[in-house]
Image (cartoon, rainbow, N blue to C red):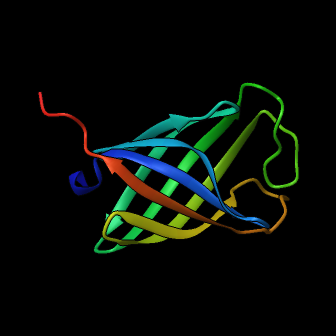
Amino acid sequence: MSELNGVWATDVLGIEGWERTGITFLQDGHLHGGSADFYHFGNYSVDDRKVKISLNLKSHSGRKQVYGKKRKEFAIKMKGKRNGDVIEGKASLLDPGSYDIAYNFRLIRLCDFPED
């Protein structure tokens, strides 16, 4: 897991192409990050090139909507494959009764954490 430690850009594929939605910090199976509208935290696991992420995303601005709903909090699962410094896959809500919509996401490594 430590091979993923670092700062990652978070993108979502929309109707106009890839959109930068925030920054994610991955460290030893845990993650946290945010943007001007959201912050998120959770955990991840790695099996060879497969990456599974579970996170809670919370709105702090009330401006943007995610998954077609305007809510303060979302539980999201993400499954993807790592290819070098890029992880691409699908993200969907964990909430029962939610829309069964999966979004394309990608994480792009920006840098490693500085050494002490």
Q: In the figure, is residue 53 to the left or right of 98?
A: left
Q: Residue at x 22, y 51 (%)?
A: 2
Q: Can you say whether 3 is above or below 90 in the image?
A: above
Name the quarter where the C terminus is drawn: top left
Q: Residue at x 50, y 69 (%)?
A: 88
92 vs 13, nearest the viewer: 13
Q: Position of residue 41 (x, y in %)?
A: 51, 37
Quarter of the picture containing the N terminus is bottom left
Q: How many marks?
A: 0
| Residue 49, percent from left and from top | 33, 74
Q: Residue furthest front?
A: 16
Q: Position of residue 33 (x, y in %)?
A: 50, 36
Q: Looking at the image, which is closer to me, 14 or 79?
A: 14
Tell me which residue sits at (66%, 30%) in the image.
36
Quarter-of-image position of residue 92 = bottom right
Residue 111, x across and y down, in percent: 30, 46
Q: Quadrant of residue 83?
A: bottom left
Residue nearest the observer in this picture, 85 or 49 = 85
Residue at (79%, 67%) from the top-left corner?
Answer: 15
Answer with left or right where residue 76 lies relative to residue 99. Answer: left
Residue found at the very far left of the displayed protein: 116
Indicate left or right for 8 with 94 as reference: left
